[in-house]
Amino acid sequence: MANVKQLVSAALTEGKGVLRLAPTWVPRSFLQPGRRLKLHPADYYALGTHRGGIDERWFGSTTVAANEGAPLDEGLSYCVHAGQRFTLKDAIAELAEEIVGDHIWKTYKRWPVYSKFFDNMGPIPHHMHQNAAQAKLVGQEGKPESYYFPPQLNPTGNNFPYTFMGLEPGTTKQQVVDCLDRWNDGDNGILDLSKAYRLKPGTGWLIPPCVLHAPGSLLTYEPQWGSDVFGMYQSMVEGRAVPRSLLTKDFPAEKHHDNQYLVDALDWEKNVDPNFKDNNYLEPIPVAATEKEGYLDRWIVYGKVNGEQLFTAKELTVNPGTKVTIKDSGAFSWITVQGEGKINGMRLQTPSMIRFGQMTDDEVFVTARAAAEGVVVENTGSDPLVSLRYFGPNAQPAAPNVGDHQQK
């Protein structure tokens, strides 16, 4: 689109540094939707049963979904202004550091992260996401990720609100190789080598690359690196077979039948860590004691992955009748999960039900400049106004470390 730059500039001027985003829906052919995304019940298979049910909504995304048979823009967020649509990816390509900030643009030349609501009826297969070096072998990016379970979107835990993570201390690589050798024999038994943790709304986890995990059935907010790579190591889930192609799709073709290579790809030390929970579990930490001022901002995703801060996230609650200016040291993507209000004068409204293709007023992207100057958030309703917002790499030097919630 030739006039994207003019459109983006006009949108940012009118929105005072805030871009309105349309909902981005992503299906998964091998999963069953959990039906808590607020989509109309008739629309969870709006893309056709051959594509699978819609079980994800992506936020602030410049990352394409790696789905077979998908259109080229699946997973990309679209900005909407004056009746026109353009991708956030194109907007950032045109205005660069004005949107994502100097550091992120100079380092990555793009917005390198995204987040999603992940919503399934049951658990998904025990899997890992490749690290940067492994993903580069197949022309992709690695994928560390994080979880937060928003209470507003978890009225029910669905079928299995527990997540297997890592491997039991003492597990050997040969035991996992044996599981992969049994792929076509039914359940390959890999969960016998792992441990399940009960998922609690209002808490979260930080998941490094190359660590096995089988996400349970809570709706999950997932800030993560901008990639869609994975390898699934479990051959059956809830009686359904998992194609072996989902194990090997993001490994070099010549290694697809080398089960020892696939096991060696795991970060063994992190998988068998006897202190796995201590090193990966997150609870919200208030940014400051501001309850008496009518609002509370809390860290919900924080910590470093292999020594690097790759993404962080906060949950902001603003009480009815309160107006507050929030300043941040980086651009962010925002999704409203409760209530109504305004951000820099732009309307915020949490929908109760969304038709596929319908525009909503719950999602925005805030530029680095606007975030630094401070956005004005106002609650105009009778419920608390609650939002989740995530940031890019090295945007929040004051963020806590994993484990700091125990000191609060």
Image (cartoon, rainbow, N blue to C red):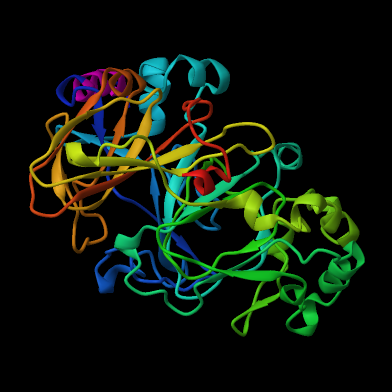
Residue for point 48% across, 70% down: 217
Residue for point 36% across, 70% down: 45
Taking depth in this image into account, of 370 and 134 the one nearest to the observer is 370
> To which quarter of the image does residue 303 belong?
top right
> To which quarter of the image does residue 162 belong?
bottom right
Up/down of 360 relative to 30, above or below: above
State left or right for residue 183 relative to residue 79: right
**Quadrant occupied by the N terminus:** top left
Q: Residue 68's spot in the image, x, y percent?
A: 56, 58
Up/down of 268 relative to 371, above or below: below
Q: Does the magenta stretch include residue 9?
A: yes
Q: Is residue 129 magenta?
A: no
Taking depth in this image into account, of 262 and 7 the one nearest to the observer is 262
Up/down of 137 relative to 375, above or below: below
State left or right for residue 325 relative to residue 53: left
| Residue with the most extreme front position | 407
Residue for point 89% across, 64% down: 172
Q: Residue 53's spot in the image, x, y percent?
A: 42, 69
Q: Which segment did they paint magenta?
A: 4-12
Work out whether residue 92 can be spotted.
yes
Q: Residue 48's spot in the image, x, y percent?
A: 39, 69
Number of numbered callouts drawn: 0
Q: Main secondary structure of the magenta part?
A: helix
Taking depth in this image into account, of 197 and 35 the one nearest to the observer is 197
State left or right for residue 286 relative to residue 209: left
Work out whether residue 267 can be spotted.
no
Q: Residue 328's spot in the image, x, y percent?
A: 35, 26
